[in-house]
């Protein structure tokens, strides 16, 4: 469980990596994802609850790299409020990328998503 955290140290290919975790909760956390990062939160084979998370994934340089705020593979993700933003120079960014996963969203108290959700089958 992460509570009231600020995560902004540069790291490649994912700020938070959750794998094979049946019960993970992230509360009131701010995540800033700078250049050359694939996803802000990478979730695989897990059940994750994101409560009031603020995630900003930004790639200003004109590179052919995609930004993904939350990537889920074979997982269930529950979102309760928060703010999710992705931005690239090439417009190759997604707020959520789902592969064989379930995304449940509650807009209480507030939810803001600035890019589309992409679902792969």
Image (cartoon, helix red, strand yellow):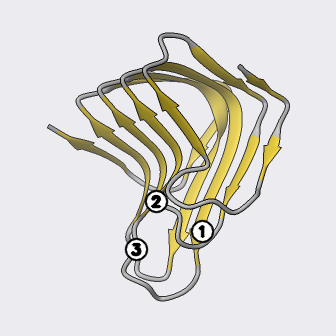
Question: What residue is shown with label 2?
Answer: 38
Give the Cα distance between marks 2 and 1.
10 Å
Give the Cα distance between marks 3 and 1.
11 Å
- Across and down, in percent, residue 34 comes to 64, 67
Element under label 1? strand
Asked if residue 88 lies left or right of residue 101, the reply is right
* Foreground disc of the pair 3, 1: 3
Asked if residue 39 lies left or right of residue 30, the reply is left
Looking at the rendering, in which quadrant would you find the C terminus? top left
The residue lying toward the viewer, choosing from 17 and 118, is: 17
Vertical comparison of 102 with 72: above or below: above
- Across and down, in percent, residue 43 comes to 45, 33
- Across and down, in percent, residue 18 comes to 51, 31
Quarter location, residue 96: top left
Asked if residue 12 lies left or right of residue 19, the reply is right
Element under label 2? loop
The residue lying toward the viewer, choosing from 63 and 88, is: 63
Q: Residues within 10 Å of mark 3 (few under 14, many from 20)?
A: some
- Across and down, in percent, residue 104 comes to 44, 21
Give the Cα distance between marks 3 and 2.
8 Å
The tag earlier along the polypeptide, 3 or 2, is: 2
The tag earlier along the polypeptide, 2 or 1, is: 2
- Badges 3 and 1: C-beta atoms under 8 Å apart? no
Element under label 3? loop
User: Which residue is pictured at 49% across the width and 57% down the height?
Assistant: 13
- Badges 3 and 2: C-beta atoms under 8 Å apart? yes
Question: What residue is shown with label 1?
Answer: 58
The tag earlier along the polypeptide, 3 or 1, is: 1
Question: What residue is shown with label 3?
Answer: 65
Looking at the rendering, in which quadrant would you find the N terminus? top right
Total label count?
Answer: 3
Residue at the far left in the pictured view: 121
């Amino acid at each position: 469980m992460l509570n009231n955290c600020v995560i902004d140290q540069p790291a490649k290919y994912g700020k938070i990596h959750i794998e094979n975790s049946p019960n993970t909760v992230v509360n009131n956390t701010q995540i800033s994802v700078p250049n050359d990062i694939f996803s802000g939160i990478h979730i695989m084979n897990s059940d994750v609850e994101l409560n009031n998370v603020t995630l900003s994934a930004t790639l200003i340089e004109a590179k052919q790299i995609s930004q993904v705020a939350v990537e889920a593979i074979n997982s269930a993700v529950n979102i309760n409020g928060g703010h999710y933003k992705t931005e690239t120079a090439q417009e190759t960014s997604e707020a959520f990328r789902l592969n064989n996963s379930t995304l449940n969203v509650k807009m209480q108290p507030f939810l803001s998503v600035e890019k589309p959700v992409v679902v792969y089958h």
